[in-house]
Amino acid sequence: MQNRLTTISVHTVLLVYTAIALLPMLLIVSNAFKSRRAIFADPLALPGPDTFSLKGFSKVLAVSDFGLYFVNSLTVTLVTLALVLLFAAMAAWALSEYRFRGRLVLGVLFAVGIMVPIRLGTVSILELMVALDLTNTLTALILVYTAQGLPLAIFILAEFIAQIPKDLKDAARCDGVGEVHIFFSIVVPLIRPAIATVAIFVMVPIWNDLWFPLILSPGEGTQTITLGVQQFVGQYVTDWNAVLAALTLAIVPVLALYLVLSRQLVRGLTAGAVK
Amino acid sequence: MPDVRLHNVSKSFGTEDVLKSVSLDIVDGEFAVIVGPSGCGKSTLLRLLAGLEQADAGDIEIGDRRVNDLAPAARRIAMVFQSYALYPHMNVYRNMAFGLKFSGLEHSEIERRVRKAAETLKLDGLLERKPAELSGGQRQRTAIGRAIVREPDVFLFDEPLSNLDAALRVNTRLELAGLHRSLGTTMVYVTHDQVEAMTLADRIIVMNEGRVEQTGTPLELYREPQNLFVAGFIGAPRMNLVTGAAAQEFGAETLGIRPEHLTIAPRAGDWTATVSMVEHLGSDTYVYADAAEAGTLIVRAGGNTSVEPGAAVKLKLDRSAIHRFDAGGTRMT
């Protein structure tokens, strides 16, 4: 009885939370398929035969360089993701496996990186990018996002790596497997679920970010989707059809990546390793 | 000749001295079993041999090479872990072949070795399975197979049977003994189970608190334990150790009598005792008797013994088979 009650209350909380989280998304998607008049007349209604319209999508695809923004966003996100996962996993392995001078200091530094928001350093970052002549490049964004994603990723991955049985690494060492191969052939496959989790954590804020693209690379060729959408948002008139259609399109890739990665999450990969 | 030699090897973790100047000689081809209670340093000793820990002092030699500073792979050893430590994401074949890939062997040679080991260990049909799909015994054999394919000079076993159930343990024990006979390679085997030690070993090394207490063949240790620790550790049920006046009667501080050297005598005996408990094992009967002079004694009697708890009995000891120890716990001759 007690158990049931707990289950029900937990699920109620989760359902309410899900509804709150999903409602804005539903609003965006449903309104993206409505005519401008219908959006204003009844924003909460679903698109019906009278109100259905693809005008927003055609406008987004016709008027703007939507394809370019899309590619820019995808490039920045994927390259950053690859860099963060590689460097974070390597750093996490080093921090949890090897005893070396300065290990603690390094660990604390990464922890501080989690606590201090990177945006506080925007001015210095901008100065740095100007000095390096990297403004209006995707490289600037990739560098900043990599720095932003690393601390938490290292923190999470180090926890997982520490849970890999010591005997496995010792067995590999007795087998004559070098440290680099131990890392790539044994450690990385075993922490795949953790890597997938971290990938989602890292990916979403980058995809959604408006701040750094606006400051570091607002140029014509380097705009990301979030920035591209802004051209439909005017000071006096906002083209809601186009904004909503662009946002709807922007959800698709991040959703696809999430689906791919989340399949990794469920697996318990260490089963059968020891005992 | 790949003899294994340790000379005054010491190791401490922090302030705790785990190994205190241990010296040891293991002859080529020998099956050496290191046995001792948990925390006696036996696993650490094995890890030092494997190169997974570094000795603080002393020399470790395998063959004629001093291997202190060599990496595990360069020592030509193979280790089987208590937890088996199989790579969970690789199937049986790849588990065995993985280490060989980095040794510069031809692909065909790797395949030949793995197939041969699989055949020896009856793993033929299981090569495509992942460790999670194997039974405990099959995982154990895979771990042994991974060691065999390396064709090492020395095999190191770290309590390899302790995760198996009793029946399987006996089987695997026999298989290990057979394996040693057919390979003829030096094996160093760590266990806390003295039955494994007695049955497998050419030579047993008894360790306690970071020191080697005694080395010798199983029967040497059983018949002539050099000190109280070995006397108490080797043999099941354990040796009766009697102190006080009863021991001084024999000119010793402590008197040791194996349970089979005590008999329940019908009339006259050395001690009078009251039976407190009787265990029937079928072939043997263990009788626990409280003697006023000697404390609780275990008597190993025949399977047909019919004494009841509470009965008063006379105990007679075989004077030719007693062990005498002095105040320091050392054997007296």
Image: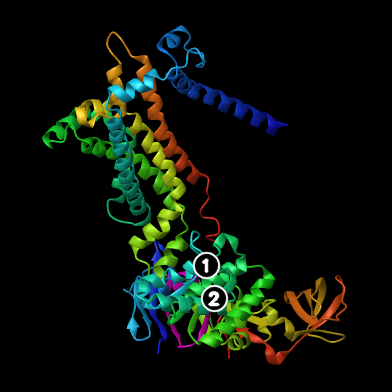
Q: Can residue B253 be seen in this view?
A: no
Chain to which the residue tagged by mark 2 belongs = B
Q: Residue at x 19, y 32 (%)?
A: A125
Lateral position of residue A82 relative to residue B253, left or right: left
Circle 1/circle 2 CB separation < 8 Å: yes
Q: Give the range drawn in magenta.
A: B19-46
State the mark number for residue B92. 1
State which quarter of the image contains the C terminus of chain A.
Answer: bottom right
Residue type, label 2:
Ala
Q: Where is residue B58 in the image (x, y as percent from the top left)?
A: 35, 77
Residue nearer the viewer, B257 or A251: A251
Magenta-drawn stretch contains A208:
no
Q: Position of residue A152 (x, y in %)?
A: 36, 40
Tell me which corner region of the image, top left, top right, bottom left or bottom right, holds residue B320. Answer: bottom right
Q: How crowded is mark 2: few (under 14 residues within 10 Å), some or many (20 or more)?
A: many
Q: Position of residue A217 (x, y in %)?
A: 21, 30
Lateral position of residue A17 relative to residue B99, left or right: right
Residue type, label 1:
Val
Do marks 1 and 2 share a chain?
A: yes
